[in-house]
Image (cartoon, grey):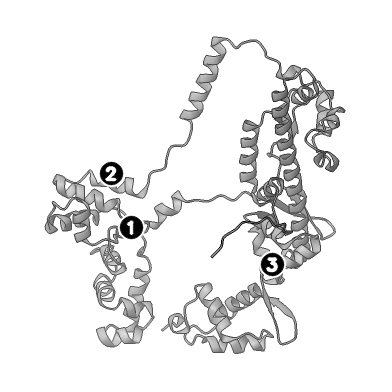
Amino acid sequence: MRLDTSQQMRTEMRLRMAPRMIQSMEILQLPIMALQERIEQELSENPVLVDLRESAAPSEADSEEAGTSTVTESEAEAEPNEVDSLSGLDENWSEYYDEGPRRSRASLSEESDRKQDAMQNMASRPRSFHDDLTEQLGFFDCGSTVQKLAEYIIYNLDDNGYLKFSLHEVIRDSGGEATQEEAEEALRLVQKLDPPGVGARDLRECLLLQLTPETPSHDVLRTLIGNHLDDLQHNRLPAIEKKTGFPIETIKEALEHLRRLNPKPGAPFAADSGTQYVVPDLIVEPNDDGSYNVRLVDDHTPHLSISRYYQKQLRNKQTDPAAREFIQKRIQSARWLIESIEQRRNTLLKVARAIIDHQKVFLDKGPEFIEPLKMQQIADRVGVHVTTVSRAVDDKWVQTPRGIFPLKRFFGGGTTTADGEEIAWDTIKQKLLEIIAKEDKQNPLSDEEIVDEMGRQGLKVARRTVTKYRQALNIPSSRQRKQF
């Protein structure tokens, strides 16, 4: 076999995304809070960027700079070496960046005191579920081995307060020196802590730990939980009556007290620590003529511009060539960022207005009147690619007269009714809730009967569709909904 080398010319086309395009897509996808963090980061890293809100007192020079803060398309397309486009900018900010008098020791000390006060006023880390249990453990008198085992058990409870390890694993992972009796004593100690039910290994044990002699229907509940929990979950009350001899009324009374027990004693602590706050990116307000106005929430977003001082240094022929190159690159980066933010603003407003126009009936009458909508429809209407719409609505929230919703809430598929009318899946969910709310609770409708009822109301859907959305809405089956 002979090996040789040769040179060949080949023409091919490749799609390469420029850094400027990548940055534009990243900025578009950011929600308002993340965008503000990104801008603050750029302000700290790029010296040629300035925030007009934090500039000197308003003056004639400032008003001129505000008028030049938006970069035109012709400037954006200029070559990096073309600095003539900066000739029309003012030079009045040079004094702002000139070195001022050195600060006194008293002023530095005062600033340090302010920073220390701010740190002291910061919110401390909230107490966790495990911290609370560990503090309660200190009130019990026990041996060091048992206490160490109990602490190990506490810090291995899941978010719901359950222990998912066996005592054998607890002994092994904690060093292997403890006995089975000491591990059981440590678990009993943890199960005495508040909230009741903590430290249980399954649902049955969790509910039994919450029973006290003062609990109404105590004996009946202990029997039902200990021996018939599966029948209770499937609402098989006649079977329980036959097995236990308890009358149906006694079982139903015990069930009312059972519903007051907490199957997830640790969940409230986890919910408090994971509270999420939503800041809307857009606000929709009604007009007098029945239409809706959409505006962007950017009142607290920094208004960026390019420093006139560095623009002057770039035009100055006496500036060091290396410094000129550095300033030139930073100005180009600043322009890209300003243009990306402006493009994000324009695209987000166009997409949001198109969505609100399509879903006007939703805002007028309520969520049950939402229209089927696909991202491709909005992309065609706005004149952008569908991926641009996807990035524009990703993790964005809108405040409307009907409440605060994610922008993705307005998108969804649908089906065609018997009359040929296209209807959204959310409308089917709402109709499903209405039918089940009006049913006879002693003789609830099966999924097949719900399909027939929807058909009589003009919504022709398959049984599997009803089952799918019933489960998605956490609605039990007809057997579990039956009331005896």
**Label 3 vs 2, first from the N-terminus:** 2
Q: Name the amino acid type tagged 3.
A: Gly
User: Picture coordinates of residue 241 (x, y %)?
Assistant: 30, 85
Q: Name the amino acid type tagged 2.
A: Glu
Work out whether 79 lies above or below 324: below
Q: Contact, CB < 8 Å: mark 3 with mark 2? A: no
Residue linked to disc 3? 366
Q: Which residue is painted at 62% across and 56% down in the image?
A: 5
Q: Which residue is painted at 28% across and 44% down in the image?
A: 135
Q: Contact, CB < 8 Å: mark 3 with mark 1? A: no
Residue linked to disc 1? 161
SS under mark 1: loop
SS under mark 2: helix
Residue linked to disc 2? 135
Mark pair 3, 1: CA separation:
39 Å
28 lies left or right of 131:
right
**Quadrant of residue 37 within the rendered picture:** top right
Residue 360, can we see it? no
